[in-house]
Amino acid sequence: MSGIIISDDKTKFPVEKAIELLHTTYWAEKRDPEVIRKSIENSIVFGVYSEDSLIGMARVITDFATTFYLADVIIDEKYRGNGIGKKLISTIVSDNRFSSLLGILVTKDAHGLYEHFGFKRDTERAMTRRV
C-alpha cells in the first residue's frame, strides 16, 4: 500500500488515537488510558500513518544489549490485509538498534506473521527470534 509511513518519532505520535486503537484489541480493550500513556512514554513506539492519520503501531521495550520485547502490535482493521503489518515488523526487526538482539513477543493469533521474520514458537503464545 503506497503512502504508508512508519516512524518512531514520539514527538509526533498521537497518544489519544493510540488509546482508541488499543481499546479495539482483545489484549488491551480494558487497559486504563493512563497505563497506555505510561507504556508509550517508557518504550520506543513505532507509528504507522496513512495521510498523517495513525492506522497502526507497535511498542519495543529493550536494554539495547541483549533483548527486545515487541508489544501492542496493531493495525486498524480497515487497513489489514495489505501487508502493512509485515512492513511494520520488517521495519522493527531490521532496525540497527534491534537487529542483533534476541526478540521476544507474546501472541494468541498472529504466529504466521511473526514467523516470516524469524520468530519461532517457544510455547503456545510466546515466540522468540534468535540471531
Image (cartoon, rainbow, N blue to C red):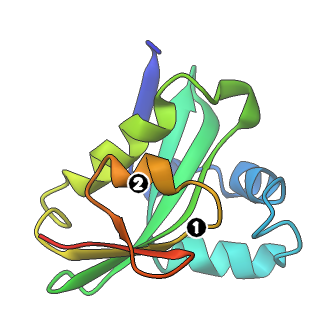
Which residue sits at x=64%, y=58%? 109
Residue at disc 2, secondary structure: helix
Q: Position of residue 105 (x, y in %)?
A: 45, 73
Q: Position of residue 110 (x, y in %)?
A: 56, 54
Viewer-proximal residue, 19 or 87?
87
Q: How far apart are the alpha carbons under marks 1 and 2? A: 9 Å
Residue at the disc numbered 2:
114
Residue at the disc numbered 1:
107
As drawn, is 129 to the left or to the right of 112? left
Locate residue 66: give its quadrant: bottom left
Which residue sits at x=46%, y=24%? 4
As drawn, is 12 to the left or to the right of 92? right
Which residue sits at x=26%, y=87%? 63
What amino acid is at disc 1?
Thr
Viewer-proximal residue, 112 or 57?
112
User: Which label's residue is closer to the chain start, 1 or 2?
Assistant: 1
Give the number of marks: 2
Locate residue 6: give its quadrant: top left
**Residue 98 marker:** none
Q: Residue furthest top?
A: 2
Q: Residue furthest right?
A: 30
Discs 1, 2 touching: Cβ within 8 Å? yes
Q: Where's the C terminus, which quadrant? A: bottom left
Residue at disc 1, secondary structure: loop
What amino acid is at disc 2?
Tyr
Q: Position of residue 47 (x, y in %)?
A: 50, 46
Locate residue 40: give its quadrant: bottom right
Q: How many C-alpha atoms fall within 10 Å of the one at disc 2: few (<14), some, or many (≥20)? A: many
Q: How many C-alpha atoms fall within 10 Å of the one at disc 1: few (<14), some, or many (≥20)? A: some
Query: Vertical placement of 102 versus 58: above or below?
Result: below
Which residue sits at x=31%, y=77%? 68
Q: Position of residue 41 (x, y in %)?
A: 54, 75
